[in-house]
Image (tube, grey):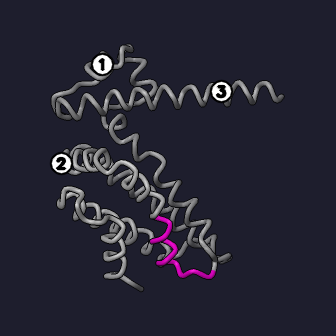
Amino acid sequence: MTPAVTRTSTRDIARKAVRAELAQVAFDLVRREGYENVTVNDLATAANVSRSTFLRYIGSKEEAVLSAFAAHGEQVAEALRARPATEDDWTALRRALDTLMERYRQDPQSALVITRLVQDTPALCARHLEKQKGWRPTLARTLAERTGEAEPTTLAHAARAAAALECLDVALDHWTASDGRLDLPGLLDEAFAALAF
């Protein structure tokens, strides 16, 4: 039984590595040429794979660019689960979003480029907002779980999760408009303070 698990795990690791490499090639090409000027065929050619291979790993041009954000929802949910149960929901949500701030601290220039690309490209912006909306139920469930409530997710949990993500978007808008000069965690703090419950 163990060898089968190892093979699956190795396959998954290899698949993730290939996907990450294809996404990086795609992002670099889109950044140089412009999103609208690049086709899936161009992305496959730049990555030196067939179109069908590219689509099998990535799925679409939008996914290639947005793969940088793919794990964000679960990362925030994990950080939220780790917050002390005595901490109020709003504070816990704010602190959980610190997991996303790390990427912006580590490589602010690349983060600025990809954030601006998503904001300035209607197809990417719409798809990113759709993905982010998908994070809401997970965050709302996590809020309910962390307090040990027997009742399932409430409207309040859902509203707080949605408001937290909107605060993140507003902070990112201001940070991008400043060309990354403003302190992003500080902007996020300010946005959360404006809606303190």
Give the alpha-carbon distance from disc 1 to disc 2, as whole Å.
23 Å
Nearest the viewer among 33 and 141 is 33
For badge 2, the amino acid type reads Asp
Tell me which secondary structure the magenta stretch mostly adopts.
helix
Earlier-in-chain disc, 1 versus 2: 1
Image spot of residue 57 (x, y percent): 45, 27
- The residue identified by callout 1 is 46
Q: Name the amino acid, label 3.
A: Thr
Q: What stretch is highlighted in magenta?
A: 86-97
Q: Dot 3, crowdedness within 10 Å: few (<14), some or many (≥20)? A: few
Question: Which label is found at residue 174?
Answer: none
Q: Percent x, y for residue 122?
A: 20, 47
Name which residue lies at 38% across and 65% down.
Answer: 165
Q: Residue at x 54, y 82 (%)?
A: 88
- Earlier in the chain: of badge 2 and badge 3, it is 3
Q: Name the residue under label 3.
A: 10
Query: In the image, is residue 157 above or below residue 184?
Result: below
Query: Foreground: 151 or 100?
Result: 100
Is residue 50 inside the magenta stretch?
no
What percent of the width, then of the height, locates residue 106?
A: 40, 51
Amino acid at circle 1: Ala
Tell me where residue 96 appears, x and y as whole percent.
Answer: 50, 66
* Label 2 crowd (10 A; few <14 / some 14-19 / many >=20): few
In the picture, the disc for residue 120 is 2
Numbered disc 1: secondary structure: helix
